[in-house]
Image (spheres, rainbow, N blue to C red):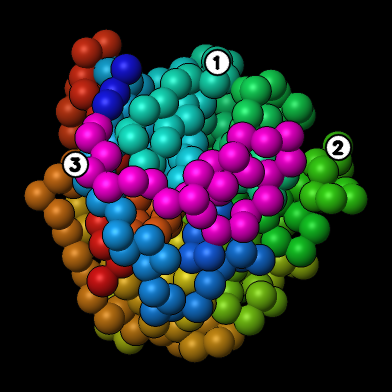
């Protein structure tokens, strides 16, 4: 069990948020928090930290040997997927304590996101598909076989769940039913237009544009960012000037600000976008002495949280893994 000293009393608002997250139906009611990858809940850039009086753990320890990749949050609760076997781990960002809530299928769990009802949409990596997991009980609700090569990341938007494939020029689109419930219906959008498939990892992180009309997809190898039509897969390269997002992995958009984890470069790029995400500029890149291949990003209470996949370390059963807390500014 992991423990951290809470130096100040936890506010009633935070406790209420935690109760909502663990209740039968999750409703995100805490100001300033957002499920990563869920644009409907994203708040404008620059919103004040709603809990300035609370000291949060700067590092969240994960189980030895876990091999984390994806992260998603709802209030002070975070979920992580394991590359090793697909387990799902749930942690409390206030205390650092957590537990495995869902045993994996033996294939990776990569990017994931949580909806407003506490359902986790999980990209299945080399398993070629995805699954939907109850974020409280860990029960597997639905599984999908896309016939993919490496299903990497996911975002929810406008009645669909969209999944990237890093080895195929495609986005898989799952239709959602009433209340965002997953259905059995999915199709494949072929990426075309400005999209160029190259050797190595291609489509990786995915989110939505500020105007809510398109998807944003980063190509890890070329460093290009694309605005993708969610109806037909047509990709338009976002003009970032001379900047590149090489090794771009998970992404988090807050208003017109896009945060991109550049995994093996051990940094986070901050990109300012126009409303349509036709143009953008890399405003800054930041690193941390605590980084060891940060792969994905979620947000809570004025900070970014990034799991460290440690890709340059040979994974063993006793290899340590952790999550780094990085202030938004």
Give the vertical position of 290 relative to 304 (above or below): above
Residue 14 at least partly seen: yes
318 left or right of 157 in image: left
Give the vertical position of 89 relative to 70 (above or below): above
| Residue 161 magenta | no
Question: Between disc 2 and disc 1, whose residue precedes?
Answer: 1
Q: Mark 2 = which residue?
A: 184
Question: Magenta segment range?
Answer: 4-30
Label 3 vs label 2: CA separation?
38 Å
Q: Quarter of the image holding residue 70?
A: top left
**Residue at the extreme right of the image, as rendered:** 178
Q: Position of residue 249 (x, y in %)?
A: 39, 53
Give the vertical position of 97 relative to 264 (above or below): above
Label 1 vs label 3: CA separation?
25 Å
Question: Residue 281 or 118: which is nearer the viewer?
Answer: 118
Q: Mark 1 = which residue?
A: 103
Q: Residues within 10 Å of mark 1 (few under 14, many from 20)?
A: some
Quadrant that contains the C terminus? bottom left
């Amino acid at each position: 069990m992991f423990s951290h000293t809470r130096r100040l009393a936890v506010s009633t608002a935070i406790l209420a948020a935690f109760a909502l997250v663990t209740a039968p139906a999750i409703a995100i009611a805490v100001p300033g928090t957002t499920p990563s990858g869920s644009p409907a809940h994203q708040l404008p850039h620059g919103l004040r930290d709603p809990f300035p009086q609370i000291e949060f753990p700067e590092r969240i320890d994960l189980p030895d040997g876990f091999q984390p990749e994806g992260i998603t949050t709802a209030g002070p609760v975070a979920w992580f997927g394991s590359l090793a076997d697909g387990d799902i781990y749930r942690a409390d960002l206030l205390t650092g304590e957590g537990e495995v809530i869902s045993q994996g299928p033996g294939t990776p769990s990569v990017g994931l996101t949580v909806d407003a009802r506490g359902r986790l949409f999980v990209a299945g990596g080399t398993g070629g598909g995805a699954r939907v997991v109850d974020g409280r009980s860990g029960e597997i609700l639905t599984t999908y076989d896309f016939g993919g090569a490496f299903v990497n990341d996911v975002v929810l938007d406008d009645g669909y769940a969209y999944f990237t494939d890093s080895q195929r020029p495609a986005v898989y689109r799952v239709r959602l039913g009433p209340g965002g419930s997953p259905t059995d219906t999915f199709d494949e959008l072929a990426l075309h237009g400005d999209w160029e498939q190259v050797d190595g990892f291609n489509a990786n992180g995915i989110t939505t544009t500020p105007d809510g009309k398109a998807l944003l997809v980063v190509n890890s190898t070329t460093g290009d960012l694309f605005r993708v039509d969610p109806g037909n897969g047509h990709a338009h390269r976002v003009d970032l000037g001379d900047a590149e997002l090489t090794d771009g992995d998970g992404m988090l958009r807050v208003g017109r600000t896009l945060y991109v984890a550049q995994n093996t470069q051990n940094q986070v790029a901050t990109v300012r976008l126009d409303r349509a995400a036709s143009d953008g500029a890399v405003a800054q890149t930041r690193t941390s002495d605590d980084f060891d291949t940060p792969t994905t990003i979620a947000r809570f209470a004025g900070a970014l949280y990034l799991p460290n996949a440690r890709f340059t370390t040979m994974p063993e059963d006793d290899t340590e893994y952790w999550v780094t807390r990085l202030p938004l500014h």
